[in-house]
Structures are given as C-alpha cells and as structure tokens.
C-alpha cells in the first residue's frame, strides 16, 4: 500500500510542477500540435498533449473552431500515400503491404487524439471537446470528417465491456444526484423532493452506466417504476400523493425515462445494453415481474402533423390516438426507418408498439411535442431478439393489433 501511495504522490507532485511550466510556453497551439505529432518520447508526448488540452480549455468558440479546422485540414488523409499503399497491396498482398494500407487509411489526427487521451483526466475532456465540435461544426463538411474520427475513437473507448452499471438511490452521493436532476431530459425533475419521490420508494428504481475514466459522470440513466399492469399516464405514475406498493406485488417494470447525459457521446448508443442489463437484473431480483414496457413520449408527432398540414385537437382523445398510431406505423424516413427518434430506438432494440395513450402527458413539453400522447413499447423477453432481427433486415414495425386498428381508423377517415 505504501508503494502505491508513493506512486500517487509522485504523479501529483509532477502534475503540480507541470502547471506553471506550461503557462510559460511561448509556442502557438499549431506549433505544439506539430511537435506532438513528431514527438517520439512518451514524456514529451504527455507534456505537449497536456499543454494543448489546457490551451483548448481556455479558448473561446472562435479559437476552438480554428483549432478544429487545423486538425481537420493539416492532419487528414494522405491520398497519394493511400493510393500507393493500395497499389502495393494489390500487386503483392502480404502482411507488410496490408499493414501499409491500414496505416495509410488512418489520418494522423487519430494518433493525436490517442496522445491527448494519455493525459490523466483527458477522456472526459475529449468528450467535452467533441460536444464543442458538434455544436460548432454543424453543416461543415470538413469538420464532419473530423467528427467521424472522434466518434470512431470514442466508440472504442466507451465499448460496452468498459461500462459499469450502478444503481442510483436516494443514498447515492449528492454530486451524482445533482447530475441526475440536471441531465433528466424527458420529464424534468423540479426539486429535491421530486427526485426523492423517484428514487426512495421501494417500487422505484434508477440505473446508470458509468465509465472508469469518468467515474462521477453518468453516461445514460433509466428510471423504472414497478406497477401492477401497464400504465397509460405519466401524471399518475409520478403523482405526489400516490401510494407506493411493495415491490414483490408488482408484475410490470416500466421504463418511463431514459436520458443520455453526455452530448459529446452523441451517436454512440448505450441504451440497448442498458435496457437489456436492467431487465436481467430486475427480473432476477423480482421473479414476479412478467411484463417489461416503456411509457415513452412521441417527440416528433406534432412537428410531423404540422408538416403534413394535418389539423388536430389535443383534447380529442380518439383522434389523437389514431393520428399517433398512424404516425408511429407509417411515417418513415427515406431509409425506411420511422421518423420518430424514440420509435427508432426502441424498435431497433426489438420492442413492439403495445399501446398509445392520449392525454398521457399534459405537461407543456408533452403537449407541444406529442399532443399529450404517450406510447408503450413492450420488451417481450421471448421475442425481442427476433423482432430486432426483423427490424434490422426489413424495417418491419411490430405493433399490437389495437394499435394497427387505430392506424387503420385514421386511414379510413382520410379516404372518407
């Protein structure tokens, strides 16, 4: 233990000494990046990478945009070298020529990112860096190439094998609970009392994925309610005066909120693994649970209806149910997937559309985005792998018969 303590002491002493030295470096950021790319000593690489990340943290948006363009343009693919490597492999397909191809296929900025990531605490900094890239580089084709590289590396670093599932409870550290409040993206948590109602009762659960390099930052979390039967209203599920039930009396686990926490990890999916692991853990602990469903928003519904010039009255439950069912089953993107992002997520995970519920979310956000309608996606443990495969191969949308009947009712009204 003494050796480990001494090692930590040495590391922190060195980091304490680096700070003042770094601030005196006169070189431009571009020169530091050039020197980092050329450095062969690990010590030099660490020193230069630390300096660059410190500089980046102090930049305003204009400087960050310039930094991103420098990485994207000065450290991109060497096309002549790639062509030569491909020609060499075609004429002599050996291990050596193949290594030359793989080396030429990787732009030098990817190795720069790896060297950045060697700095203590850099993984979290790079996640925030990508969030800045996504925010500042939207619509810029050159920066989109840089984002492809960053996403590729982050997907490797945040592989499912590295993630840790942790339960979140009212007894969790306050700094974690504060982040749950801040990151809740579906149903806002308005106060500590509101959070307590979601975490403390025995018929409520919350789980989050963490990464060892970011132990105090949840990546994604899911809130779960244990109920009897499938609920059709978020108001009743989160009511202040509801009476908690003994968890062993529940027959249904309801995933009513799934929130991604890190904008810099956009496009790197954790939700599929999260739901499957939570289902496994909860069903093992409570064998009486037979049904696993979501109570989900339909965030694209009202926007799609407006684009189609379809008028609707959110107070007309029958019409809203038909419109929502039609939208979920038939509103498609050019690639054949549903327009609705939540539908794409759950159907892609192997769920089926079980029921739609008008008047289920009467919050300002729920009425604006979904016209108050919510939907249950059912995770049938005996079928979701089959449904997942069917969706992946043919984009088939699985739905319960009542939902299909509601969609058909809307189509009949249109014909009439």
Image: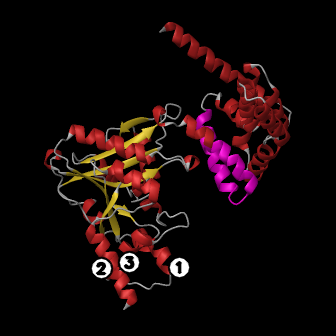
Give the percent coordinates (x, y) of residue 106: 72, 37
The residue to which callout 3 is attached is 323
**68 to 317, vertically: above or below:** above
Position of the C terminus by quadrant: bottom left
Give the percent coordinates (x, y) of residue 141: 74, 56
Q: Nearer the viewer, residue 339 or 392?
A: 392
Give the image quarter of residue 414: bottom left
Element type where label 1 sits in the image: helix
The residue to which callout 2 is attached is 317
**In the displayed structure, does residue 173 sit left or right of residue 251?**
right
**In the displayed structure, does residue 87 sit left or right of residue 122?**
right
What secondary structure prevails in the magenta region? helix
- Between the C-alphas of marks 2 and 1, the distance is 21 Å
Q: Look at the image and give the residue range highlighted in magenta.
A: 122-151
Element type where label 3 sits in the image: helix
**186 to 37, vertically: above or below:** below
- Between the C-alphas of marks 2 and 3, the distance is 10 Å
Q: Is residue 282 visible?
A: yes
- Between the C-alphas of marks 3 and 1, the distance is 14 Å
């Amino acid at each position: 233990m003494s050796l480990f303590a001494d090692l930590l002491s040495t590391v922190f002493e060195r980091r304490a000494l680096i700070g003042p030295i770094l601030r005196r470096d006169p070189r431009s950021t571009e020169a530091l990046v050039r020197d980092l790319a050329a450095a062969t000593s690990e010590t030099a690489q660490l020193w230069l990478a630390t300096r660059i990340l410190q500089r980046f943290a102090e930049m305003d948006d204009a400087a960050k945009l310039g930094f991103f363009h420098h990485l994207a343009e000065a450290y991109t693919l060497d096309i002549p070298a790639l062509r030569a490597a491909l020609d060499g492999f075609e004429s002599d397909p050996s291990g050596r020529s193949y290594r030359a191809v793989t080396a030429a296929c990787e732009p030098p900025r990817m190795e720069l990112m790896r060297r950045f990531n060697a700095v203590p605490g850099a993984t979290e900094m790079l996640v925030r860096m990508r969030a800045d890239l996504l925010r500042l580089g939207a619509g810029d084709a050159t920066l989109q190439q840089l984002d492809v590289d960053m996403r590729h590396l982050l997907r490797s670093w945040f592989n499912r094998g590295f993630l840790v599932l942790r339960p979140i409870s009212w007894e969790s550290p306050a700094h974690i609970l504060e982040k749950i409040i801040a990151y809740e993206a579906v149903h806002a948590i308005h106060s500590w009392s509101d959070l307590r109602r979601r975490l403390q009762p025995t018929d409520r659960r919350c789980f989050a994925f963490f990464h060892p390099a970011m132990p105090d930052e949840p990546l994604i979390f899911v809130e779960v309610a244990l109920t009897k039967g499938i609920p059709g209203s978020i108001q009743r599920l989160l009511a202040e005066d509801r009476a908690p039930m003994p968890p062993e009396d529940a027959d249904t686990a309801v995933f009513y909120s799934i929130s991604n926490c890190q904008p810099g990890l956009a496009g790197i999916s954790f939700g599929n693994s999260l739901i499957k692991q939570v289902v496994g853990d909860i069903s093992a602990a409570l064998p009486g649970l037979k049904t696993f469903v979501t109570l989900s928003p339909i965030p694209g519904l009202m926007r799609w209806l407006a684009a189609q010039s379809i008028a609707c009255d959110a107070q007309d439950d029958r019409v809203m149910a038909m419109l929502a069912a039609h939208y979920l089953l038939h509103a498609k993107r050019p690639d054949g997937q549903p327009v609705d992002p939540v539908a794409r997520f759950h159907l892609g995970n192997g769920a089926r559309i079980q029921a739609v519920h008008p008047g289920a979310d009467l919050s300002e956000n729920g009425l604006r985005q979904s016209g108050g309608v919510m939907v249950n996606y059912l995770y049938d443990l005996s079928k979701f792998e089959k449904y997942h495969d069917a969706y992946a191969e043919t984009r088939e949308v699985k739905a319960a018969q009542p939902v299909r009947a509601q969609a058909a009712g809307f189509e009949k009204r249109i014909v009439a």
